[in-house]
Image: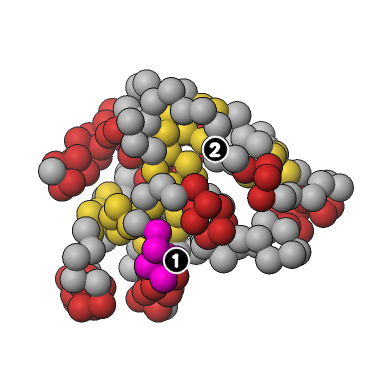
Amino acid sequence: MKSFVVTGIGTNIGKTVCSAVLCEALKANYWKPIQSGELDALDSSFVQSLTSETEVIPAKHLLTQPLSPHAAAEIDGIYLDESDFELPHFTKTTLIEGAGGLMVPINKDGLCFVDLFQLWQLPVFVVTKHYLGSINHTLLTLCTLFQREIEVESLIINGERNASTEEIYYSYFPELKITYIPEFEEFSQESIAKAAKAWLDQMN
């Protein structure tokens, strides 16, 4: 049994949609340790509603404000510490979704998501998409992970592909596995299942 982390090169990059596809493809459970804001529309509920077998592990912290976790936790009167995020006992493959990108602060004393990923020592799926500035954001994310000796399972391109941009990624990281998940016209169990099958074909 192997579990994975899902992170992105920034906010609103499509991590949760990709997490749903990956959960369906891998028949995995889902854990998002921290959700900040939008507590009436949890990412975990979205993933569970679109997958056939995914069970949700309850979040460690549900923060009321749609802010960086360190700021949202302070408003809620909570201090988030590394010891809060020991991995639960997983009974099957589980995807763990971070919030924002690697350097999103969890507290004011220097703890970021990448520190948790390094602590957990799980392979990471990095979600990116093509926009002006995405090459910089993607390379910075990959460089940080490799410098920390954190395994990158795949760089997942969410949406349209761009061969020229992908060549840049390969020029820095020749062994990088790049896969892609297309944009969805609508979200349904059927569309997620179709994307999951297509993604699995790329990984094999």
Point out residue 28 in the picture as x, y percentages from the top left corner. 37, 30
Q: CA distance from mark 2 to mark 1?
A: 19 Å
Q: Which mark is residue 148?
A: 1
Task: Name the residue rendered at 27%, 34% in the picture.
Answer: 25
Quadrant containing the N terminus is top left
Give 191 or 23, whichever is nearer the viewer.
23
Q: Please report the residue visible at 18 percent of the width from the left and 46 percent of the height from the top.
A: 203
Q: Quadrant of residue 157?
A: bottom left
Residue 140 within the magenta-colored segment of the rendering: no
Work out whether 144 lies above or below 114: below
Neighbourhood count class around disc 2 (C-alpha, 10 Å): few under 14, some 14–19, many 20 upward: few
Residue drawn at x 56%, y 59% is 115
Q: Residues within 10 Å of mark 1 (few under 14, many from 20)?
A: few
The region drawn magenta spans: 145-150
User: Looking at the picture, does residue 49 appear above or below residue 125?
Assistant: above
Q: Which mark is residue 190?
A: none
Residue 89 position, x and y percent, is 51, 28
- Work out which quarter of the rendered image holds the C terminus and state it: top left
